[in-house]
Image (tube, rainbow, N blue to C red):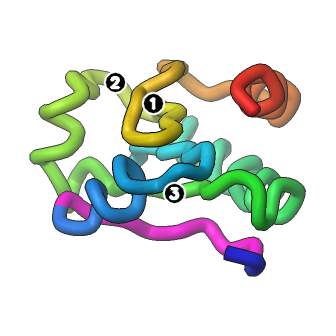
Amino acid sequence: MADSKVVIINDEDFANEVLNSETLTVVDFWAEWCGPCRAVTPIMDKLSEEYAGKVKICKLNVDDNDTVPGQFGIMSIPTVLFFKGGELLASKVGALRYDGYKQIIESLM
């Protein structure tokens, strides 16, 4: 996990990529039509570079996947969930600035 790419995930690989990961994993639930979601995308890209090898950043499109969003009660997007070792540690509904997400990540590391 040395590269700094945001991992695009779906319902099928969610458990493997997120729940089975011992690394702090950030999941951005989004959709193409959602303006605030599009504003969060460059923030997630920047975080994936800054925390490469330490934090896994994932994106899950709610229009293409309904099982996982349903399991976690995602009603509004963007919603960002923070997991480690299969446990949901924190969640944030609505778009934050870069510093907001960074502060949550730092508090969970």
For marks 1 and 3, the one nearer the N-term is: 3
Q: Comparing marks 2 and 3, which lies closer to the viewer?
A: 3
Q: In screen coordinates, is 5 left or right of 7?
A: right
Name the residue carrying label 2: 76
**Residue 34 location (% of width, % of height):** 44, 43
Binning the other alpha carbons within 10 Å of mark 1 as few (below 14), some (14 to 19) or many (20 upward) gives some
Residue at image location 82% in from the left, 35% down from the top: 98
Name the residue carrying label 1: 79
Q: Quadrant of the N terminus?
A: bottom right
Binning the other alpha carbons within 10 Å of mark 2 as few (below 14), some (14 to 19) or many (20 upward) gives few
> Is disc 1 placed on a helix, strand or loop?
strand
- From the viewer's side, name the closer residue of 5 and 107: 107
For marks 2 and 3, the one nearer the N-term is: 3
Q: CA distance from mark 1 to mark 2?
A: 7 Å
Residue at image location 47% in from the left, 55% down from the top: 21
Q: Quadrant of the C terminus?
A: top right
Q: CA distance from mark 2 to mark 3?
A: 17 Å
Residue numbers of the magenta segment = 4-11
Amino acid on which disc 1 is placed: Thr
- From the viewer's side, name the closer residue of 17 and 102: 17
> Is disc 2 placed on a helix, strand or loop?
loop
Q: Is residue 65 above or below residue 70?
A: below
The reply to whether callout 1 and callout 2 are in contact (CB within 8 Å) is: yes
Name the residue carrying label 3: 58
Residue at image location 61% in from the left, 67% down from the top: 6
Q: Is residue 27 above or below residue 77?
A: below
